[in-house]
Amino acid sequence: MIAKLKLYGQLVRLDKPIGILLLLWPTLWALFAAAEGMPNLHILLVFILGTVLMRSAGCAMNDYFDRNVDPHVARTRHRVLATGAIKPREALYVAAVLGLVSFILVLSTNTLTILLAMIAALLAITYPLFKRFFAIPQAYLGIAFGFGIPMGFAAIQDHIPPVAWLLLSANVFWAIAYDTEYAMVDRDDDLRLGVKSSAITFGRYDVLIVGLCYAMTFVLLGIAGAWLEYRWIFYTALSVAAVIAAQHLSWIKGRDRQACFKAFINNTWIGAVIYIGIALEVLY
């Protein structure tokens, strides 16, 4: 049983928390912005736990849909479903259990948040399918990974103000940037297998477009900050995040696989710095 649980932990990437963090930071942006201070502890815990559970369920679903692709990709060929260490139906069971627990958690919030949670679940389940036909599946990922933003505002304010959609739009551009860096690692394998990705779609303009997506992220966040009447603290944090993004561009310009993966992982610091800027604004 312990060995099996360890395999399930690998299935849902508990040993690789970067996905949880990239999902969590935008959610925390929204919760603190919506509360204009420290969020209600119950709501905060529901969203943190829900983030971990839904990201984990999403990983299980992703590996289920990619079970015939992952064995042929250098980065993913050792995943537990690709190696046959667990069966496909087990991945579905794990995803179902995690999704159910997450839904039970969200039942303690308001009706609007519950409705949005259903949409969020649909986004998480269908994202892997978009890699089969959509030229820039990273944009869809940005919506899925940023849907905690409207949910956070809904849970605290019981409505979704326009600034929430502005923050979600910023997250979409950020996700295109960081997941293109990730996709650059797999580009050769994806081309061979016919899997769609922004790294393939952007071609030789990949680094330029990643830079433009970062720029759009910071422009939209800057507009959101002005909307929320944030001061120099937030804009200082935004400037620091922009410097980190510029460092990423210097890393990926050679398109080395390891450098691109390093840039992807390092994006957690962009999300963290922006969160610190918002938190300091509303708490002090």
Image (cartoon, rainbow, N blue to C red):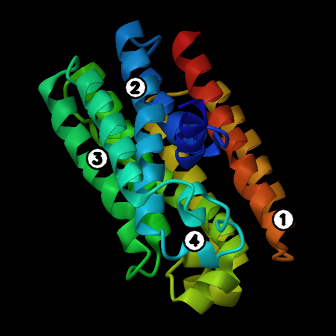
Q: CA distance from mark 4 to mark 2?
A: 30 Å
Q: Position of residue 144 (x, y in %)?
A: 39, 52
Label whose residue precedes the other's in the sequence (2 or 1)? 2
Q: Amino acid at mark 4?
A: Asp
Kindly identify the residue that appears in the image at 55 percent across and 11 percent down. 283
Label whose residue precedes the other's in the sequence (4 or 2)? 2
The residue at which mark 4 appears reads as 70
Q: Amino acid at mark 1?
A: Gln
Q: CA distance from mark 1 to mark 4?
A: 19 Å
The residue at which mark 2 appears reads as 47
The residue at which mark 3 appears reads as 121
Q: CA distance from mark 4 to mark 3?
A: 23 Å
Instruction: From the viewer's perspective, tell me whether residue 20 is left or right of residue 98.
Output: right
Q: Secondary structure at mark 2?
A: helix
Q: Nearer the viewer, mark 1 or mark 4?
A: 4
Q: Nearer the viewer, residue 263 or 227?
A: 263
The residue at which mark 1 appears reads as 258
Q: In terms of image quadrants, where is residue 82?
A: bottom right
